[in-house]
Image (cartoon, grey):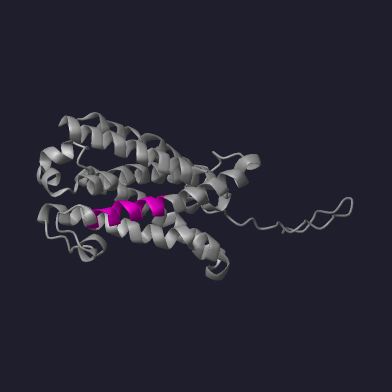
């Protein structure tokens, strides 16, 4: 179900971007006018649309995961939320692959090497942001299907990977967008919206640290370990008129 919605969102964004190209309002074409002459507009616009949908779905997946790992998610709906979370994580991978591979047809000299290998980008200003996106893609491909291998990996190892790598994937994705997004410029509505979207993520992350679903994972638990209580030896009963011996 969520994959169908993701395809619809991608198509809608794609049509908006193509319309902007026709009206001359496209930020991508303004920065790279040769896209129109080489016929690479459709591929670049498809990459943009899939990337936009991938970022939104990554945001949703991250929020759902943090809610599941904290007390924000009630127990009665936890199983349903987990199913949605698994589905959206796979959708993110599919959208990110379309986002990357569509660039092979944008007529700007991209090759499988530059699209899939970090640091292989010949355009120097884009080397770092594109590398961040490629690393995020590979991490997502590793983490997403790992749920179905958790028994072989071990539940503890699987949880550890999710706890640290999932936030890393999301941070890399946002960083990639802020640095490389054609339509995300400092001060414009998309830029401000992207930053505003991080407010609930930060709130859910704090809830994950302070009120986790498993009490043993609480952040304060690591700073205030529980002390062991030592049982006191009972005092021997004293006979009437006699003092009990000192303990």
For the point 39% across and 57% down, the residue is 140
**239 or 15, which lies in front?**
15
Q: In this view, does 210 lie above or below 223?
A: above
| SS assignment for the magenta stretch, majority | helix
Q: Where is residue 139 in the image (x, y as percent from the top left)?
A: 37, 60
Q: Position of residue 216 (x, y in %)?
A: 56, 53
Farthest residue to the bottom: give it: 152
In the image, residue 39 lies in the stretch drawn in magenta = no
Residue 125 in sight from this viewpoint: yes
Start-end of magenta stretch: 92-104
For the point 78% across and 56% down, the residue is 235
In the image, residue 98 lies in the stretch drawn in magenta = yes
Q: Quadrant of the C terminus?
A: bottom right
For the point 37% across and 35% down, the residue is 199
245 relative position to 15: left or right: right
Q: Where is residue 194 in the image (x, y as percent from the top left)?
A: 30, 36
The image quadrant that residue 119 belongs to is bottom left
73 relative position to 114: left or right: right
Q: Where is residue 193 in the image (x, y as percent from the top left)?
A: 30, 32
Residue 212 in sight from this viewpoint: no
The image quadrant that residue 45 belongs to is top left
Q: Is residue 64 above or below residue 134?
A: above
């Amino acid at each position: 179900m969520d994959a169908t919605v993701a395809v619809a969102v991608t198509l809608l964004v794609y049509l908006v971007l193509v319309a902007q190209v026709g009206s001359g309002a496209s930020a991508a074409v303004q920065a790279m006018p040769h896209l129109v002459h080489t016929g690479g507009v459709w591929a670049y616009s498809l990459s943009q649309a899939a990337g936009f949908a991938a970022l939104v779905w990554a945001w949703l997946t991250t929020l759902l995961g943090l809610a599941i790992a904290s007390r924000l998610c009630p127990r009665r709906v936890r199983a349903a939320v987990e199913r949605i979370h698994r589905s959206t994580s796979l959708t993110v991978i599919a959208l990110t692959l379309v986002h990357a591979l569509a660039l092979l047809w944008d007529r700007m000299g991209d090759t499988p090497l530059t699209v899939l290998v970090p640091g292989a980008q010949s355009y120097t200003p884009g080397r770092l942001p594109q590398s961040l996106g490629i690393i995020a893609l590979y991490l997502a491909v590793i983490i997403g299907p790992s749920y179905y291998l958790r028994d072989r990996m071990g539940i503890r190892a699987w949880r550890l990977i999710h706890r640290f790598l999932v936030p890393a994937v999301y941070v890399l994705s946002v960083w990639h967008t802020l640095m490389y997004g054609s339509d995300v410029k400092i001060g414009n509505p998309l830029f401000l919206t992207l930053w505003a979207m991080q407010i609930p993520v930060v709130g859910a992350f704090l809830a994950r640290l302070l009120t986790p679903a498993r009490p043993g994972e609480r952040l304060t638990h690591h700073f205030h370990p529980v002390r062991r209580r030592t049982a006191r030896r009972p005092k021997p009963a004293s006979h009437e008129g006699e003092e009990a011996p000192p303990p």
